[in-house]
Image: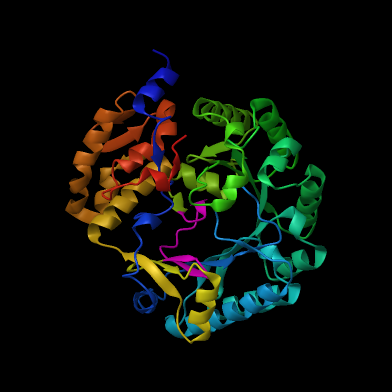
């Protein structure tokens, strides 16, 4: 029996699973948690422990059909300017809730399209944020950039504010694929923007690519990889496209028959991984790649790699504060998400309140399972010694899960009583193995294919 046959037998092509950028996952959030708990948990932040800051800008001048993020299209600057004023009010409100002396290890602007912000508002927002929560020494400031939606003034504003890393959305350079996903973006404009960023002193560049898109085949994806490699990014994220049109309505614009099947997706991911490794990139977790001298590679090698809502990170901050509509915070007591509807978020903040609308409180069982799942997602191994160092004897409560995972995926997973290890041949099953430690019922319709 071939390895592919064994993976089929294990259910790889039949299962949808969470990506486990959090645990409990967002599907477990409820309205029982809101602004009251958000305020309590913000006050509990240890002042000596740096936090991460995430700012969500939900606007786009164009709505890419493949995207399942919380975004909305705009035709003028007016909604963006109005939203920015609310963000400034949220920052001011947040400052009154936080302990004195708190610092940030990371600041990340995401979306949507953060570069839709006018230059003067970029300056105001970053100044307000770094005044409320100063960036710690060696802190990092990253921005998600659509090369078709940034001009020199906006780039200069982010650089002047201290941007150290840019995450460049590409997905695929094939014109046919771009047409099918509603995102036209030439290699030339992408290269021009990356060159300008480096000239401005932004020396860490991440490129986001996607496999499993309509009309995508290996000839096209390998050509995209060839072009991407000429840009010499420090990191590459290669995500599997999640086709969930029942949740992301704009995905109904994508022709389902044009999507590669499960085995074709698997083949694309495997070939792309091999190609990137041949060109000197280290595989990080299930979908990232980095140069050997990059901080992400060093974190992976030292087993200090972490996973949060932005994906894989070397950031060791235990807490993340999300600002803006739909953003999610991880706080000492649990996860809390701001109002996802922009109008409701605006109303909450302008009314003088925090915008938390839903979330979940952490119990001890959640905490230990979250760390176990994070180890599997980051290290492909769950060490019970390391787990016990944080949670004591309670770590032993997961032994039965480890034994069950080893039995179910015995061709690809081994357990010696102390460490549950996913073998290299089974790393495409990682999300499924992690799901064995999820104590909540998983609704497969809410998640993407495991491959």
Name the residue located 71 percent from the left edge and 39 percent from the top edge. Answer: 228
Visible residue check, residue 39:
yes
Q: Is residue 163 magenta?
A: no
Across and down, in percent, residue 343 comes to 54, 75
Q: Is residue 324 magenta?
A: yes
Count of numbered circles in the view: 0
- Left of 99 or right of it: where is 420? left
Residue at (69%, 66%) from the top-left corner? 74
Q: Where is residue 54 in the image (x, y as percent from the top left)?
A: 53, 66
Give the image location of residue 14, x and y in percent. Answer: 40, 31
Residue 73 vs residue 206, the one in the foreground = 73
Note whether residue 172 is visible.
Answer: no
Residue 199 figure quarter: bottom right
Residue 395 vertical placement versus 353 (above, below): above
Q: Which residue lies furthest to the top in this view?
A: 1
Q: Where is residue 117 in the image (x, y as percent from the top left)?
A: 70, 70
| Residue 280 occupies quadrant | top right
Q: Which colour scheme is used?
A: rainbow
Quadrant of residue 144 within the rendered picture: bottom right
The magenta-colored residue range is 308-329
Quadrant of the frame with the N terminus: top left
Q: Is residue 152 left or right of residue 261?
A: right
For residue 236, above or below residue 371? above
């Amino acid at each position: 029996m071939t390895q592919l046959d064994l993976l089929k037998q294990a259910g790889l092509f039949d299962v949808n699973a969470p990506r486990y950028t959090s645990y409990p996952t967002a599907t477990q959030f409820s309205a029982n948690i809101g602004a009251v708990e958000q305020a309590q948990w913000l006050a509990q932040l240890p002042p000596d422990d740096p936090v991460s800051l995430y700012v969500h800008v939900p606007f786009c001048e164009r709505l890419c059909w493949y995207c399942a993020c919380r975004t909305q299209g705009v035709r003028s600057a007016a909604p963006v300017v109005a939203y920015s004023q609310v963000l400034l009010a949220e920052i001011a409100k947040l400052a009154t809730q936080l302990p004195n002396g708190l610092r940030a290890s990371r600041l990340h602007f995401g979306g949507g399209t953060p570069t839709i912000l006018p230059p003067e508002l970029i300056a105001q927002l970053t100044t307000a944020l770094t005044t409320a929560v100063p960036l710690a020494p060696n802190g990092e400031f990253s921005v998600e950039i659509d090369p078709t939606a940034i001009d020199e003034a906006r780039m200069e504003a982010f650089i002047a504010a201290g941007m150290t890393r840019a995450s460049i959305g590409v997905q695929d350079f094939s014109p046919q694929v771009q047409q099918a996903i509603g995102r036209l973006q030439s290699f030339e404009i992408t290269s021009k923007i990356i060159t300008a960023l480096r000239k401005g002193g932004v020396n860490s560049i991440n490129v986001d690519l996607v496999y499993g898109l309509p009309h995508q085949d290996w000839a096209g994806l390998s050509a995209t990889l060839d072009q991407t490699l000429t840009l010499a990014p420090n990191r590459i994220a290669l995500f599997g496209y999640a086709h969930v049109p029942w949740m992301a309505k704009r995905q109904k614009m994508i022709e389902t028959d044009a999507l590669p099947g499960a085995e074709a997706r698997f083949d694309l991911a495997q070939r792309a991984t091999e190609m990137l490794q041949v060109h000197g990139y280290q595989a990080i977790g299930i979908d990232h790649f980095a140069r050997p001298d990059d901080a992400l590679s060093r974190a992976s090698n030292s087993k200090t790699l972490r996973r949060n809502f932005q994906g894989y990170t070397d950031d060791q901050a235990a807490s993340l504060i999300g600002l803006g509509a739909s953003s999610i915070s991880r706080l000492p007591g649990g996860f809390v998400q701001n109002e996802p509807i922009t109008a409701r978020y605006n109303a909450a903040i302008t009314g003088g309140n925090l915008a938390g609308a839903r979330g979940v409180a952490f119990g001890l069982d959640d905490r230990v399972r979250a760390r176990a799942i994070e180890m599997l997602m980051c290290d492909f191994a769950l060490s019970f010694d390391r787990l016990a160092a944080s949670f004591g004897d309670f770590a032993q409560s997961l032994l039965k899960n480890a034994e069950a995972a080893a039995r179910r995926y015995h061709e690809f997973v081994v357990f010696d009583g102390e460490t549950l290890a996913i073998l290299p041949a089974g790393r495409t099953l990682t999300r499924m193995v992690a799901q064995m430690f999820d104590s909540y019922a998983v609704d497969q319709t809410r998640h993407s294919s495991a491959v």
